[in-house]
Image (cartoon, grey):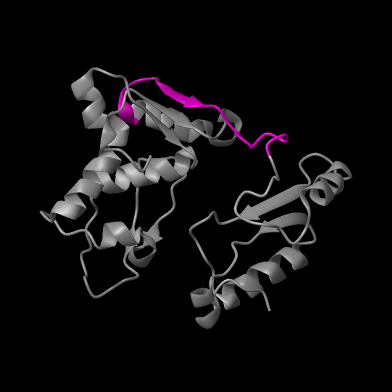
Amino acid sequence: MFVGWTHHLARQLGIRRYAFFPSGAFAISFVYSLWREMPQRKNYSDDNEMVGFPRIPNSPFYPWWQLSPIFRRYVKGDPKMEFIRDSFLANGSSYGSVFNSFGGLEGAHLDYLKKELGHNRVWAIGPVLPPDDVGPNERGGSSSTSISDIRSWLDTCQDHSVVYVCFGSQAVLTNKQMNELALGLEKSGVKFILAVKGATKGHVEEDYGAIR
């Protein structure tokens, strides 16, 4: 998904290009709409101005400051920015799109993408996980709890009784947000697994990414 420019090369060579997205279909629906529709602020001094994408199923409104930092830095005509925009849009122009997701989770957004892209060459093949026989199962770094302990604990839980909370590999919450999230999960009384991205030295110095 980060090499959308290869779509143009594939076309020159007469090769069908398939874009693989490790992210979910909702995220890509949002990213594609963002770079295609290019929403603009009415009040440039208000970072809390709300931006909506009503064509996307179940899409909430977002304050401007929560949109992609890359998008917010976009300057029309700037060669680097135009290259980035073209790369994202080129993914949508590819022959097919493959997602690490499944219809039971994101059926509405997979259907939305088929409609927006104008074809049915949108496949969900997930969840794609690393095989057990290829080294340690430690995607994203080591865990404070072993994978075997987590699996053993999950085996004791009833189906549909555990909430999995993860903000991906990019988002890092402030320490205050982390504490509020952990407190809310604890007070909810539900069983949960909270996956937390390890804080870098810079994050620690700026009070990000830790539960106190």
From where the camera sits, is residue 88 visible? yes
From where the camera sits, is residue 37 visible? no
Q: Nearer the viewer, residue 11 or 51?
A: 11
**Residue 60: x %, y % from top left:** 44, 52
Q: Is residue 137 magenta?
A: no
Q: Looking at the image, which residue is at 71% across and 45% down? A: 136
The kind of secondary structure the magenta stretch mainly shows is loop
Q: Looking at the image, which residue is at 71% across and 51% down? A: 163
Q: Looking at the image, which residue is at 20% across and 47% down? A: 83
Q: Nearer the viewer, residue 18 or 154?
A: 18
Q: Looking at the image, which residue is at 79% across and 46% down? A: 161
Q: Quadrant of residue 4?
A: top left
**Residue 11: x %, y % from top left:** 22, 23
- Residue at the extreme top of the image, as rendered: 14
Q: Nearer the viewer, residue 129 or 179?
A: 129
The quadrant the C terminus occupies is bottom right
**Residue 65: x %, y % from top left:** 35, 67
The residues colored magenta run 116-134
